[in-house]
């Protein structure tokens, strides 16, 4: 029998919101050429991971929120470290956001799936 993950652990590991065991993405985020590949159906429970056509367009708003949160955090940390010149702010923020783009993409989609898909955890599947 499989162990049950908490909702937060399943979210952080990119697992299906219904069974919390099947992966949402086909490849690890470290494989940059295929970091955006998603399963059409959960490999564990078989639920459709794109509830309707164009579902993930709304994830752009979540991605925007993540980007703004990172921008504010980085700016605040740089300010605390001595308030450097503007070009350091700009370079640090742009390079960090480029580096975090695959994670931002994934977690905005995962968050949108968990929050707005209507898919809820079901213990009977296990």
Image (tube, rainbow, N blue to C red):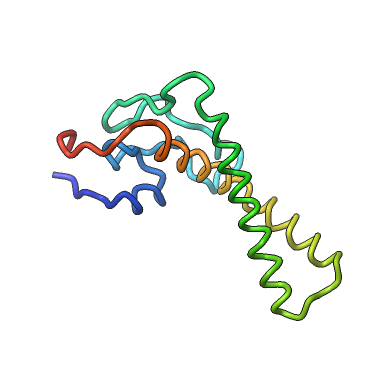
Nearest the camera: 58 or 36? 58
Q: Indicate the quadrant containing the C terminus: top left, top right, bottom left or bottom right.
A: top left
Number of marks drawn: 0
Relative to 122, is 77 on the left or the right? right
Q: Residue at x 72, y 72 (%)?
A: 78
Report the side of 106 relative to 39 (left or right).
right
Q: Residue 3 at x, y = what percent?
A: 19, 49
Q: Is residue 70 left or right of residue 3?
A: right
Determine whether 42 is above or below 7 in the image: above
Q: Residue at x 47, y 31 (%)?
A: 38
Q: In this view, which residue lies farthest toward the top?
A: 53
Answer with the quarter of the image where residue 123 lies.
top left
Question: In the rendered view, would you say 37 is above or below 4?
Answer: above
Q: Residue at x 64, y 51 (%)?
A: 67
Determine which quarter of the picture holds residue 40: top left
The residue lying at 55 percent from left, 32 percent from top is 58
Q: Relative to 41, is 80 above or below?
A: below
Residue 81 x, y percent position in the rendering: 71, 79
Q: Quadrant of the N terminus?
A: top left
Residue 112: x and y in percent read 47, 38
């Amino acid at each position: 029998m499989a162990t049950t993950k908490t909702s937060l652990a399943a979210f952080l590991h990119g697992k299906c919101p219904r069974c919390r065991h099947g992966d949402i993405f086909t490849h690890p985020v470290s494989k940059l050429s295929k970091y955006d590949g998603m399963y059409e159906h959960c490999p564990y429970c078989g639920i459709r991971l794109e509830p309707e056509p164009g579902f993930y367009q709304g994830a752009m708003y979540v991605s925007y929120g993540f980007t703004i949160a990172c921008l504010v955090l980085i700016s605040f940390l740089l300010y605390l470290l001595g308030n450097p010149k503007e070009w350091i702010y700009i370079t640090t923020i742009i390079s960090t956001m480029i580096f975090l783009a695959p994670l931002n993409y994934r977690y905005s989609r995962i968050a949108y799936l968990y929050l707005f898909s209507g898919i809820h955890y079901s213990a009977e599947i296990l």
